[in-house]
Image (cartoon, rainbow, N blue to C red):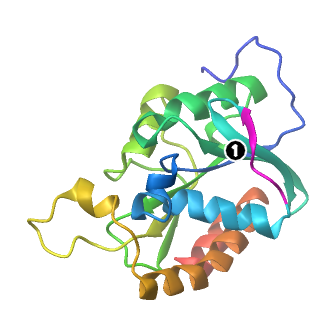
Amino acid sequence: MFFKSKQTGNNNIEYLIVGLGNPGRQYESTRHNAGFISLDYIADRLDVKVNRIKFKSTVGEARLAGHRCLLMKPSTFMNLSGQAVTEAMRFYKLPPQKVIILCDDINLDVGAIRIRRKGSDGGQNGVKNIICLSGSDEFPRVKVGIGKKPHPEYDLKDWVLSRFSDKEKTVLKETLPKIYDAVGLMVNDDIDKAMNLYN
């Protein structure tokens, strides 16, 4: 497997926690950036700055539930997220099971979350690229609901790049503590409990 690289890594990092999104001010607060929004909340709770440039990402190191984690926001744009994730996996020699992905999901209502131990990309292009470049779908993930398209003819790209309404922002804000708690359980290898509590 690719993560058994001979490249020397710092094995002190036990988990990657990766929020998916698009970099740049024009994409801030868009639906597709629900992963970034979730990661920013986790970083704020842990009083960590995610501002160092590494692995084609902005990153910050944190200790969550007693585990040393690297918080990552890929700068590759959504569809190439796998470039950043697999580079970090190689460096730290981490298997997919130690990489937690936070991403948006149009099949869930705003405020809903869905935790999965592994599985297909579900139509999410960032996850699709990670699976493609890593050769594995065994990434734990937290899917964050961004709501379905308002009608079938609505262009999907326009929808995911639209911004949350004020009411939706309030609902999402109330969901973020649940995502934080769920990720804390996941790094303690208690995904089943996280799924039972938050799915």
Q: Which SS does the magenta portion mostly show?
A: loop
Vertical placement of residue 4 versus 23, above or below: above
User: In this picture, which residue range is highlighted in magenta?
Assistant: 48-53
Q: In which quarter of the view is residue 8 placed?
A: top right
Q: Is residue 116 visible?
A: no
Q: Is residue 50 magenta?
A: yes
191 left or right of 151?
A: right
Q: Secondary structure at mark 1?
A: helix
Q: Name the amino acid, label 1.
A: Lys
Query: What residue is shown at x 48% (from left), y 67% (from top)?
Result: 144
Q: Residues within 10 Å of mark 1 (few under 14, many from 20)?
A: many
Q: Residue at x 58, y 81 (%)?
A: 173
Give the residue number, with chain letter if any, for mark 1. 98
Q: Please provide percent x and percent y for residue 30.
A: 43, 63
The spot of residue 6 in percent (x, y) is: 75, 11
Q: Could you say where residue 133 lies in the image, as x and y percent from the top left?
A: 47, 26
Relative height, residue 87 to residue 199 (above, below): above
| The image quarter in which residue 190 lies | bottom right
Res. 67 visible in picture: yes
In the foreground, 58 or 42: 58
Tell me what residue is drawn at x 34 percent, y 53 percent: 122
Residue 46 placement, left or right of 168: right
Which residue reaches farthest front?
Answer: 25
**Residue 98 highlighted magenta (yes or no):** no
Work out whether 158 lies above or below 94.
below
